[in-house]
Image (spheres, helix red, strand yellow):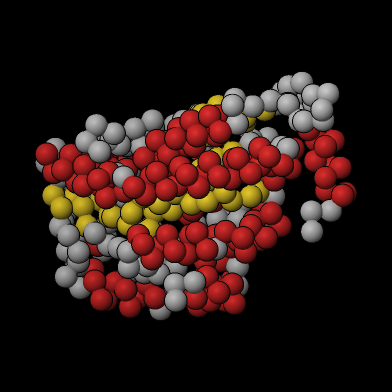
Amino acid sequence: MKNKTIGITLGVLLIGAVLVLGACSRAGSGTTGAGTDSRTFSLRLAHGVPETDPLHLAAAEFKRIVEAKTNGRLTIQLFTNSVLGDELALGRSLGDGSLDMTTVASANAQATVPSIGAIMMPYMYTSSEEAWKVLDAVIPALNERAIREGNVRILGFYEKGFRVLTNSRRAVTRLSDLQGLRIRVSPGEIPLETFRSWGIEPIPMAWAEVFTALQQRVIDGQENPYTTIPTSRFDEVQRYVTDIHYMMWTGPLMISERTYQSLPADLQRDMEASAQESIIWLRQYHNDLIEDARRDILAKGMVLSGTPVDEDEWQARAKSIWPRLYDGAGGREWVEYVVGLLD
């Protein structure tokens, strides 16, 4: 892809109907004489990445598919680059119903749906295929929690590969090289505690602030997938890359439960099917996107150090903190259920 860089109760139904009638900004005309629901809906989907990022490409594919599948009855307005708020704010807006849809990093979505943490345990996966198996299987059970915890529904997960460590000061080839570096992580318990297990105090920071902080040397580095480096222009302010493999970058495509219940059943089904098609679409180009990003940043002078020579030590330290993470990720039984999906 060289040129593509990148049962429901009657009461709930009645509530959904009232919300639809009140949502004048989203719904058009009513039903046909035959009783078929012909209303049109326009939903706002916001995220925090530029239009070159694979996450946006997947969101744009979702928009294309759902608009075609519904013959234009359901349209999607895309808002990029955190113009409607950073990723934490987008999650909050989704929960209170002031935003229809979003797709953000799971580490930030966990602030809205704590139980998402169960798919993010450090060194949980060894491959994208393992992650896909869990991400697909977990949706029904996770949504029971997501609706209760954050008033949101998860349509599926996008995935962009393992997060890698970048920094501007030195090659990190072993754990001792990490010491003293100021590394930004998503402001969630799992990445924070993982980096603490490696002996440093990471810096939680909103995604929209990261490039400027790297540029001004407020921080030395950050961790994200390979594809994020060129699309966010990190190659301009970072030099060294290390494949730390501790977490897959995953991002749920989420819809406000209020918005979801306002849609007719046929549009709900079409939207869910469209989400799955866009997820499969991104997976098809997954490896090409990563390899394109690697070639791009190598050509721009970045140094790729590969896997740390003492990766076993990184893993042992990170896995030792799993018990401390259970409560914030939905509880030990829930985490064990999710990890069991790998079997």
Residue drawn at x 76%, y 30% as measured from the top left: 37
Placement of 168 over or under 20, stated as above or below? below
Image coords of residue 200 (percent x, y): 34, 64
**Res 128 → quadrant:** bottom left
Q: In the figure, 205 relative to 326: above or below?
A: above
Q: Give the percent coordinates (x, y) of residue 4.
A: 29, 34
Query: Where, by quadrant of the figure, is residue 273 drawn?
Result: top right
Q: How many marks?
A: 0
Residue shown at 55% from the left, 29% from the top: 67
Foreground pick, 105 / 205? 105
State which quarter of the image contains the N terminus.
top left
Report the residue at 59% width, 72% height from top. 334
Residue 222 visible within the image:
no
Q: Is residue 65 left or right of residue 282?
A: right
Query: In the figure, is residue 315 to the left or right of 79?
Result: left
Q: Is residue 142 visible?
A: yes
- In depth, the one of 245 and 324 nearer the eye is 245
Q: Position of residue 156 (x, y in %)?
A: 52, 51
Residue placed furthest toward the front: 34
Q: In the rendered view of the protein, which quadrant contains the C terminus?
A: bottom left
Residue 178, quarter of picture: bottom left
Residue at the far top in the pictured view = 29
Task: Please determine whether, in this image, residue 30 is positioned above or below residue 116.
Answer: above
Observer-nearest residue: 229 or 222? 229
Q: Nearer the viewer, residue 175 or 270?
A: 270
Question: Residue at 43% across / 39% down in the picture?
Answer: 58
